[in-house]
Image (cartoon, rainbow, N blue to C red):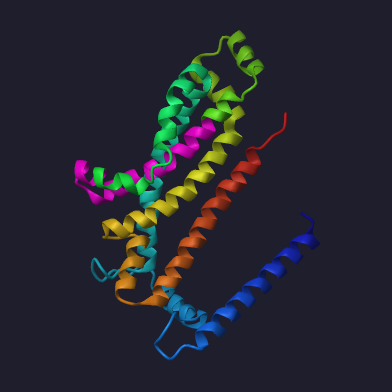
Amino acid sequence: MRRDDRTRVIVTSLLVGVVLLALWQAAVARNPPGKGLPGPVAVAQTAAEMLAHPFYSNGPNDKGIGLQLMASLGRLTVGYVAASLTAIMLGVVLGLSPTLYRAVNPYIQVLKPISPLAWMPLFLYTIKDSAQAAVLVIFMSSLWPTLANTAFGVASIRRDYLNVAALLQMSWWRRLIVVILPAAAPAIVAGLRISIGSAWVAIVAAEMLIGGTGIGYFVWNEWNNLALTSVIFAILAIGLIGVLLDVGLGRMARRLAYTE
């Protein structure tokens, strides 16, 4: 994109944001004091207060927004990394074996549409730990997009590449690292990008159920306290973190994209 075009897009985006904030403020200004949703001015004031001390801890039900986000991102990292490694390895195996893929695919299609939160009761019953159950929810939400994209990417590799690797008598692991993963990398990263969005959505919902710490629990706790400005700010923070995660993987996808 040219510099002039980029500047025009940024200016237009800022104008749209200003108009939306003005409409929001005008809509809530009609409400009686203390009634209805808070406006952007009130939310901004709450945001400034929360960001001034984001890492305080005054007990289990009174922690700063920074600690809540760190707890959620920690669970996200553990579940997402475990699911990604599992999905990539299984996807490679399925992509290299069309027969095995056709045999396993019906089971994948049955499990894939199940909401990750539907697994929560079973996880809580079996492992008796709400924090680990939330991590497993992340695992389930992250597994299927990466698995499907990896299998598709590996199955789409030109057979010439694999034939040359076999001709050079490469070991299986060397073939995986030098040929298979680089050739399938664009499809794999596309799956990882979808998975990170699904995982971030799932962790917020899971934390509302398990309680304790995390941005999802923070939203629910603030709602119970009728602190709607805090709820709206937390929602905006969730959206911002999701955008940053998606942008990071999007940049990785662009770097790995190639044309044959």
Depth check: 176 or 28 in front?
A: 28
> Viewed as shown, does residue 224 lie left or right of 161?
left
> Viewed as shown, does residue 177 lie left or right of 164?
left
Q: Main secondary structure of the magenta part?
A: helix
Q: Which residue lies at the image location 51% right of the left edge and 79% below the top edge? A: 40
Q: Which range is magenta? A: 123-150
The answer to which quarter of the image holds residue 36 is bottom left
Depth check: 180 or 120 in front?
A: 120
Q: Which residue lies at the image location 24% right of the left edge and 51% below the top edge? A: 130
The answer to which quarter of the image holds residue 80 is top left
Residue 194: x and y, percent?
52, 45
The number of discs equals 0
Residue 208 visible in image: yes
Please check the rendered image and state whether residue 124 is part of the magenta-colored stretch, yes or no.
Answer: yes
Residue 145: x and y, percent?
49, 39
* Placement of 29 over or under 186, stated as above or below: below
Q: Quadrant of the C terminus?
A: top right
Residue 97 visible in image: no
Q: Which residue lies at the image location 49% right of the left edge and 19% below the top edge? A: 173
